[in-house]
């Protein structure tokens, strides 16, 4: 057993917009996420890969693609040893359909959402649903935000799949969202 992360993936056009934003931020010297564009749905410690893939496959087979929007920025404040940096994030819309989707994924295995899963856990209360852009020095946040606002990263997006990763990042499997009557094929 090891640590795993389940992420929500976007449509191809949104991925392109976010990757363009990342390229601009890198060109201006800002550190950005290496993960593919995503919203973290859950992060687990010491959970069986097979159980997680089984649940993710079952869940994906019952859920359709969801339209949401990336309409604002959020900042996870400095804390602990990271007292001079903050995580700058794209903030998804909190539509009932998306929040229900997020919460229903947590029906199982929430007891494994500790440590690395703290911000995503519903048991710990008030999960912070976000798409991290990067960890930026507090003194540079204003300039980074101005750069982000100059791009076309905001707007409607479509949630198309869930992906299971090891933590640190290595893709295990992708599960496209589909109708319940089309069974997925699992490799786990």
Image (tube, rainbow, N blue to C red):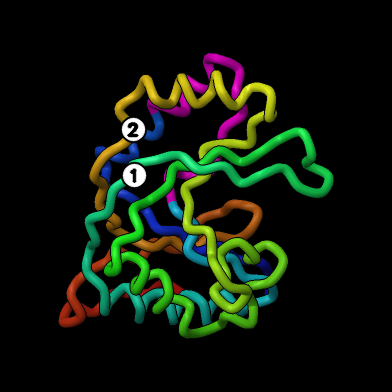
Q: Quadrant of residue 165?
A: bottom right
Q: Is residue 12 above or below residue 161?
A: above
The reply, left or right, for residue 115 in relation to residue 58 is right
The reply, left or right, for residue 96 in relation to residue 3 is left
Q: Quadrant of residue 67?
A: bottom left
Q: Which residue is mark 1?
A: 70
Q: Is residue 103 above or below residue 70?
A: below
The reply, left or right, for residue 55 in relation to residue 13 is right
Quarter of the image containing the N terminus?
Answer: bottom right
Residue 5 on image: x %, y %: 56, 62
* Label of residue 153 in the image: 2
* Label of residue 100 in the image: none
Please give the name of the residue rendered at 69% of the width and 23% of the height, measured from the top-left corner: 139
Q: Quadrant of residue 82?
A: top right
Please give the name of the residue rendered at 63% of the width and 65% of the height, measured from the top-left corner: 117
Nearest to the observer: residue 71 or residue 151: 71
As drawn, the residue found furthest toward the top would be 28
As drawn, the residue found furthest toward the right would be 81
Query: Residues in magenta?
Result: 20-38
Q: Is residue 33 magenta?
A: yes
Distance in Å between CA atoms under marks 2 and 1:
8 Å
Q: CB under 8 Å between callouts 2 and 1?
A: yes
Crowdedness near tag 2: few (<14), some (14–19) or many (≥20) residues, C-alpha within 10 Å: many
Q: Secondary structure at mark 1?
A: strand
Q: Secondary structure at mark 2?
A: loop
Q: Is residue 117 magenta?
A: no
Q: Is residue 60 above or below residue 15?
A: below
Nearest to the observer: residue 123 or residue 50: 123
Residue 141 on image: x %, y %: 60, 27
Residue 79 on image: x %, y %: 76, 47
Nearest to the observer: residue 164 or residue 83: 83
Of mark 2 and mark 1, the one earlier in the sequence is 1
């Amino acid at each position: 057993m090891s640590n795993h992360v389940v992420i929500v993936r976007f449509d191809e056009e949104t991925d392109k917009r976010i990757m363009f934003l990342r390229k601009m931020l890198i060109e201006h010297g800002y550190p950005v996420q290496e993960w593919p564009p995503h919203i973290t749905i859950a992060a687990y410690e010491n959970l069986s890969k097979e159980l997680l893939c089984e649940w993710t496959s079952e869940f994906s087979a019952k859920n359709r693609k969801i339209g949401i929007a990336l309409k604002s920025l959020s900042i996870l404040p400095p804390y602990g040893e990271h007292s001079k940096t903050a995580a700058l994030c794209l903030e998804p819309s909190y539509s009932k359909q998306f929040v229900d989707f997020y919460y229903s994924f947590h029906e199982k295995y929430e007891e494994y959402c500790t440590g690395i899963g703290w911000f995503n856990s519903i048991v710990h209360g008030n999960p912070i649903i976000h798409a991290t852009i990067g960890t930026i020095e507090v003194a540079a946040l204003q300039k980074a935000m101005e750069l982000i606002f100059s791009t076309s990263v905001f707007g409607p997006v479509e949630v198309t799949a869930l992906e299971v990763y090891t933590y640190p990042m290595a893709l295990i499997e992708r599960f496209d969202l589909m109708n319940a009557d089309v069974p997925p094929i699992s490799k786990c």
